[in-house]
Image (cartoon, rainbow, N blue to C red):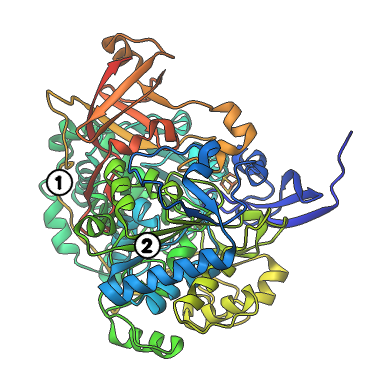
Amino acid sequence: ALQVPDKAVESVCPYCGVGCQLTYHVKDNRILYVEGRDGPANHERLCVKGRYGFDYAHHPHRLTRPLIRRADAPKRGDAVMDPDRVMEVFREATWDEALDLVGERLRTIRDTHGKRALAGFGSAKGSNEEAYLFQKLVRTGFGSNNVDHCTRLCHASSVAALLEGIGSGAVSNPVMDVGKAEVVIVIGANPTVNHPVAASWIKNAVKNGTKLIVADPRRSDLARLAHRFLQFKPDTDVAMLNAMMHVIVHEGLVDEDFIAGRTIGYDELRRNVEGYSPESMAPICGIDADTLREVARLYATSKGSMILWGMGVSQHVHGTDNARCLIALALMTGQIGRPGTGLHPLRGQNNVQGASDAGLIPMMYPDYQRVDNAAARQKFEQLWGMPLDPQPGLTVVEVMHAIRAGTVRGMYIMGENPAMSDPDANHAREALAALDHLVVQDIFLTETAYLADVILPASAFPEKTGTFTNTDRLVQMGRQALDPPGDARQDLWIIQQIAARMGLDWHYRDVSEVFDEMRHSMPSIGGITWERLQAEHAVTYPCLAEGDAGDPVVFTTTFPTETGRARFVPADIIPANERPDGEYPRVLITGRQLEHWHTGSMTRRASVLDAIEPDPVALVHPLDLEEIGVRPGDVITLESRRGEVSLYARAEEGTPRGAVFVPFCYYEAAINKLTNAALDPFGKIPEFKYCAVRIRAG
Ligand code: SF4
């Protein structure tokens, strides 16, 4: 019979950073269907994930009781989740028993081995309020700054370059500004797959006359619409971008007034790009000199040029250098600070911007106030009522090294899945298994939860209320549509229960009180009240005082640096950490696909999405498949120096010869077992976009 919803709840999409507003139509505590709302980022549009990816919340695999590892169940680093055999490894417990055990173990580690022996990973899928309380718990209850989240794995290098260059890690202009730009460069990003509604605005802009330049080692769907598609060789971003800057300098296309009035360090940059002529860089990056010249001229001379980038730029050992080049391009041509210009690193998860803003990072308090800055530390010591550790904490990958070294011994992980998402995943799993105590808070028995001592059943996205900040700096209201199943509890409640057991005396009556504390410690959102969010659903920051409209376009007159000026930072070519050789002759590039999200824990349990893409695949150029001696659909095995996985071969002409692209969402072919944990020295981001592998049939 036709089901009629009994309520409609206005919220936002739980997946990507575009931040589409949507309505959940609910009957009897089940979502029947989802519709797009007229939000600033989507104007009623939704992609396949937002529209059909909701029934994971009702999946029978949902965790509904706290679980404690049985005394006789060994932890195995290579364990693969088997939901039907959970009770052989864990036993059910009451909340009090589970929370008391967590508190007792974490306190013992802290008191025996010191405050820095504990660490926490928060989540970019949680709300701003959850992120804020989580980092506050780690800094005040655990007593160190060892708190991080998945921004370390996606845009940490972009943020490092942006903070250094222009004083702010957030975007300068919203995605919608592509409609006002004459030229749009999309580099190292595949928005049709990863930010589909944003891609639809780019496609609309092209239809209305915007010239699109797509630059990527893989030919994406968006490249079909490009005025020029630059299929540069993997790992050669700096060579290509420095050559474009060389052209701009040599042809006098720089904006001298902008450089003189609003920047520092230009002479050093100019001297540096001198050695990067298009002719000398063409053989390195694979783009001919004429095309490099044409694209450089187009970008520099248009009335408005905008750059959007993704993890193809950021996930390299030279990710910060790649982003430095993009920033320098915008600064030398004055293509920033006006509508239809600027720099936009496309954010991955729906709240990676907000979680970073809220201080879920080891070197910064909320609003990027540095932990090693005495004045900032004093401010938060006063607000939180206790002394704080002045030493920046460890990042995601550094924590794994510290566990192996025995210096980190206890962890609290909320809604992250490092056993799947960390590079060199076998080592990451071994590290997690070696902890004295691991508590994982999640909605499913993830590969990480399988290694835990205690698992706390949490709430799915539609089961809680909170704020989320999208890639455009829009703070938006997500509202509760469902009750959590069984004994599962809201994340904000769980964090506070652990805080109480770590000796903290917190009293938040509801989520709005957490938001209120945040806005009083974060100048950028100081003017946003809970009541305004309730009424308007979304407010852009910076919003310094109540009543401010919020600024979608920033840096119009000054940059938020000490001098008010932006800084050029030159970059030179640094090769990937692990190059192909005779033994491992191909390049592995990892990423995502349209239907699945990150480690797949939600989308692979969303029936429509899983039906479309049910099996692990590797995308290989058809001629390479011939060379290997397999046909599309055959099983192939990929090996690196760190591990091997088997999966199905799929022919894709857009993948460059000699490379293979694999999504990281499939637990049965966890591709991060192969990736390289080498880090960018500034952003500490791992090199997910380049390592050496070999492929064999079968
Ligand atoms: Fe959700 Fe992103 Fe798709 Fe919008 S584009 S519906 S935010 S996944």
Label 2 residue SS: strand
Farthest residue to the right: give it: 1
Quick check: 4 left or right of 383? right
| Contact? badges 1 and 2 (CB < 8 Å) | no
Q: Against 470, is 242 above or below?
A: above
Is 268 in front, or is 502?
A: 502
Depth check, mark 1 against mark 2: the one in front is 2
Position in image of residue 405 (x %, y %):
19, 58
Label 1 residue SS: loop
Q: Residue at x 54, y 46 (%)?
A: 198
Q: Is residue 381 at all visible to an observer of this figure?
A: yes
Position in image of residue 335 (x %, y %):
37, 57
Position in image of residue 332 (x %, y %):
28, 58
To which residue does mark 1 refer? 574
Question: Label 2 crowding class (10 Å Cα cut-off): few <14, some 14-19, many 20+?
Answer: many
Quick check: 251 left or right of 486? left
Q: Amino acid at mark 2?
A: Met
Q: How many marks?
A: 2
Q: Is residue 557 at all visible to an observer of this figure?
A: no
Residue 638's quadrant in the figure? top left
Q: Against 277, is 95 above or below?
A: below
Is 452 in front, or is 228?
A: 452
Sequence-first disc among 1 and 2? 2
To which residue does mark 2 refer? 411
Question: Label 1 crowding class (10 Å Cα cut-off): few <14, some 14-19, many 20+?
Answer: some
Q: Against 259, is 481 above or below?
A: above
Quadrant containing the C terminus is top left
Q: Amino acid at mark 1?
A: Ile
Quick check: 273 left or right of 352? left
Quadrant containing the N terminus is top right
Residue 629's quadrant in the figure? top left
Q: State how far apart marks 1 and 2 are (Cα).
A: 34 Å
